[in-house]
Image (cartoon, helix red, strand yellow):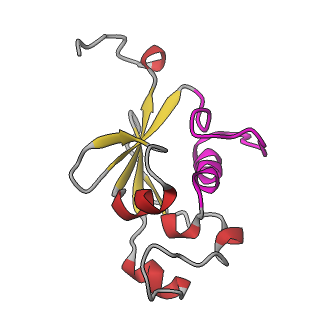
Amino acid sequence: MAFYAGNTTNCNNKFRGFPGFEDDDVVSTVVPAVTVVVEGRSICQRISLHNHGSYESMAKALREMFVENAGDSDDLDLSNVIPGYLIAYEDMDNDLLLVGDLSWKDFVRVAKRIRIIPTKGNSRKGSTRAA
């Protein structure tokens, strides 16, 4: 499994989600990296959320991981990180939720896995499920 440390330019931002932990080395041992799963692929990636200070920073890291010739995009947001896919996460209760619904601080606290799910039109199976 590959490990992705994230954007090093954001390492100077102190993690404020855990009072008393100002040292990034200490935080990295306390807050584990989360698994990033792309539906339909057998190999996962990992990302350390504490290395990112916002959804935008995480979005750039995910794009670099999964999109060839990602390049820099100023208009990058969670809806267009990986074309044809939605970015969701599993929380501590194993609920699947869309990334961006919580504040960044709360997201980092509760996210245990990031799931990248094909949009309906991009599904390989082509079947539709009743709600």
Using the image as rendered, state which of residue 22 and residue 82 is in the foreground: 22
- The x and y percentages for residue 5 are 56, 68
39 sits to left or right of 51: left
Magenta highlight: main SS? loop
The quadrant in which residue 53 appears is bottom right
Is residue 4 rendered to the left or right of residue 40?
Answer: right
Q: What stretch is highlighted in magenta?
A: 54-83
Inspect the magenta stretch and tell me whether residue 57 lies in it: yes
Q: Position of residue 109 (x, y in %)?
A: 38, 64
1 left or right, relative to 77: left
**Residue occupying the point 59% across, 58% down:** 54
Q: Where is residue 35 in the image (x, y as percent from the top left)?
A: 39, 56
In which quadrant will I find the C terminus?
top left
Residue 6 locus on image (x, y percent): 59, 64
Asked if residue 113 is positioned above or below residue 84 in the image, the reply reads below
Q: Nearer the viewer, residue 111 or 45?
A: 111
For the N terminus, give its image quadrant. bottom left
Let me know if residue 114 appears in the view: yes
Is residue 48 in view? no
